[in-house]
Image: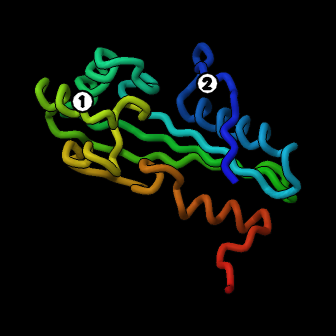
Amino acid sequence: MVKPCDIDETPRVGELARDYVLRLAIAKAEAAAPLTHLPTLGSDTAVVVDGRILGKPVDFDAAADMLRLLSGKRHEVLTAVAVSGPAGMLSCCVATQVTMREISADEIADYWRTGEPADKAGGYAIQGLAAIFVQQIQGSHSAVVGLPLFETTNLLRRQGVPIWQRV
């Protein structure tokens, strides 16, 4: 079951990006825990460039600013996962380096018109149309798309969650 949690996602003054995504992942897992007797999972992802956390763009101008900032550069995608369960709160943070090719102003405008960047951290979706902008990735592709599968599986196992379901 997926249960979106309404938590404040504002970065704290001076908060490092890694601490930020871990704090949000843990808060989401904690918010969902009272709703079930099962282990709960929370996660959060941030795109970080030049020490700046990029959230979701509110409009075209914000998306264009983000994509111009990422254009021709390497940035970091941090994905934190937290699982609350019998073993307590377990968490991890996965860092992946993504290098974008140069992106023209026309490409940014065309990409915005697809609707894809509107609700994506950093204004792009690597699993979608923005894949054509990605020159190189170092680290976990699944962490950039959503959940880091290797690390999430390990946390779930430590909480006693069976990974393979026999039918």
Q: Tell me the element at label 1.
A: helix
Q: Residue 139: percent from the left, percent from the top? A: 40, 54
Q: Which residue occupies the extreme bottom position in the image?
A: 167
For the question of whether residue 48 can be seen, the reply is no
Quadrant holding the N terminus: bottom right
Amino acid type, residue under disc 2 in the picture: Glu
Residue at point 65% right, 65% down?
154
For the question of whether residue 159 can be seen, the reply is yes
Q: Residues within 10 Å of mark 2 (few under 14, many from 20)?
A: few
Q: Residue 94: percent from the left, percent from the top? A: 52, 49
**Residue at label 1?**
113
Please tell me which residue lies in front, 135 or 107: 107
Dot 1 or dot 2: first in sequence order is 2
Q: Tell me the element at label 2.
A: loop
Q: Residue 160: percent from the left, percent from the top? A: 79, 68
Please tell me which residue lies in front, 91 or 164: 164
Residue at point 25% right, 48% down?
131
**Residue at label 2?**
9
Mark carried by residue 101:
none
Asked if marks 1 and 2 touch (Cβ < 8 Å), the reply is no
